[in-house]
Image: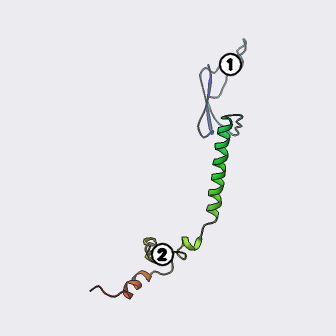
């Protein structure tokens, strides 16, 4: 028997088995490509109601995550929103790299502290 295998990503297909068509007595077409790429794939009726509910929940979760990603608090992300930003190791690294615009701020804070006794 000839079998058609499709990869998990639904991108590639592979024929396994004899290339001759045995459906009709005349033999049919002798040529079948052994491997190929899938351009369009339409799947009908797989999984039942439980699979449909799970898929809908997955789609809602993906949409929610995409919406949350669009609403990034840039001020908190880049140091303006958090009171702990001044002591954050990421700020120190960004200061040294000159990204935050306050390259000497860390060392300036050290000068403001009283010396240890």
Mark with earlier residue (2, 1): 1
Give the percent coordinates (x, y) of residue 73: 59, 70
Which residue is nearer to you in this view: 32 or 115?
Answer: 115
Q: Quadrant of residue 3?
A: top right
Which residue is nearer to you in this view: 99 or 105?
Answer: 105
Quarter of the image that includes the C terminus: bottom left
Does 113 appear above or below 72? below
Q: Nearer the viewer, mark 2 or mark 1?
A: 2
Secondary element at tag 1: loop
Instruction: Identify which residue is drawn at 65% across, 19% down.
Output: 20
Secondary element at tag 2: helix
Residue carrying label 2: 85
Instruction: Identify which residue is drawn at 45% across, 71% down.
Output: 90
Give the percent coordinates (x, y) of residue 18: 61, 20
Which residue is nearer to you in this view: 6 or 32?
Answer: 6
Residue 32 - label:
none
Instruction: Answer with left or right where residue 7 lies relative to residue 88.
Output: right
Instruction: Identify which residue is drawn at 48% across, 81% down.
Output: 102
Mark 1, other Cα within 10 Å: few <14 / some 14–19 / many ≥20: some
Quarter of the image that includes the N terminus: top right
Q: Quadrant of residue 14?
A: top right
Which residue is nearer to you in this view: 71 or 97?
Answer: 71
Residue 21 - label:
1
């Amino acid at each position: 028997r000839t079998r058609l295998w499709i990869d998990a990503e639904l991108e590639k297909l592979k024929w396994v088995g004899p290339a001759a068509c045995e459906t009709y007595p005349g033999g049919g077409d002798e040529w079948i490509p052994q491997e190929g790429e899938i351009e369009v794939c339409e799947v009908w009726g797989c999984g039942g109601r439980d699979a449909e509910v799970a898929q809908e929940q997955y789609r809602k979760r993906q949409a929610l995550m995409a919406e949350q990603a669009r609403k990034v608090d840039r001020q908190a992300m880049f140091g303006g929103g958090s009171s702990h930003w001044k002591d954050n190791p990421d700020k120190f690294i960004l200061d040294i790299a000159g990204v935050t615009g306050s390259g000497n701020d860390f060392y300036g804070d050290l000068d403001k502290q009283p010396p240890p006794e």
